[in-house]
Image (tube, rainbow, N blue to C red):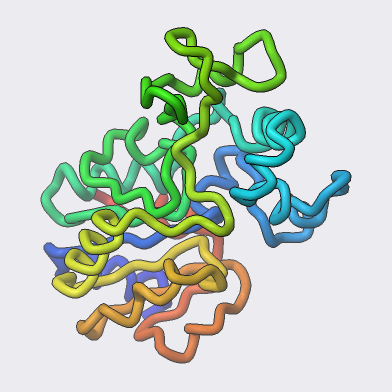
Amino acid sequence: MTNIEQFLQMVKESDNIVFFGGAGVSTESGIPDFRSVDGLYNQKYEYPPETILSHSFYIKYPEEFYRFYRDKMLCLDAEPNITHKKLAELEAAGKVKAVVTQNIDGLHQLAGSKRVLELHGSVHRNYCRKCGKGFDAEYVRDYPGKVPLCDACGGTIKPDVVLYEEGLDQQTLEDAVFYISHADMLIVGGTSLAVYPAAGLIDYYRGNKLVLINKSATPMDARADLLIQDGLGNVFSQIKC
């Protein structure tokens, strides 16, 4: 039995699956990841992406922050790929109980997934730091000035994404821990498992069907019950719901 056949058998036998995904889930939708050869970390900007995407940089240099953010983080024309779609189908079939994602693109919801725990927030939610009014991603993208301002009070708008130096939302973390600790199958896909505290969530899984799907090696490979070094699209396209 091949690794993928083994994976399909596990999916068939499980009815409490949690999927935990990273940037690799969305690269097949044309959204760049951070750490691969052509990822954002290897592109040349005046400052490194980690610096630009930090809270202190956003406060100090909002114009430069938004120039990078609009250019690289707002991928509003991206469409869900086969992995997003299959996860939504598996949820509709009662098999997937939650999707825990490090991505901020909203593609899981666009594909139809209902229970999506966004560890790092979403580009689709933005709020005024002064009065709290909410704005969608299109408002931020199309705002005529360099830094989007609130149309009610003139305050600066901040994306509801977790920047470097900021903590994760406590409720989202607790919900992720709940679903992962109760799962009979945990599928981890498209993540280097290098970003904490997100990567540490795997420690809460207590079952014996931990599947890691990633093109390159991760620090957790030895802990996997099943390791598949392949593209997510190739694996998920073989699932029949």
Front-most of residues 184 and 130: 130
- Give percent across and percent down for residue 209: 27, 79
Occupied quadrant, residue 5: bottom left
Image spot of residue 35 (x, y percent):
69, 61
Camera-side residue: 84 or 121?
121
Q: Residue at x 47, y 69 (%)?
A: 213
Figure disc tally: 0
Q: Nearer the viewer, residue 46 or 202?
A: 46
Q: Is residue 7 left or right of residue 37?
A: left
Instruction: Estimate the x, y position of residue 197 in percent, counting from the top left.
Output: 44, 70
Q: Nearer the viewer, residue 39 or 86?
A: 39
Q: Is residue 74 visible?
A: yes
Vertical position of residue 19 compared to residue 210: above or below: above
Q: Is residue 130 above or below residue 64?
A: above
114 w.r.t. 76: above or below: below
Residue 238 visible in the current orientation: no
Image point (16%, 56%), residue name: 95
Indicate left or right for 35 with 239 as reference: right
Residue at 32 percent across and 78 percent down: it is 210
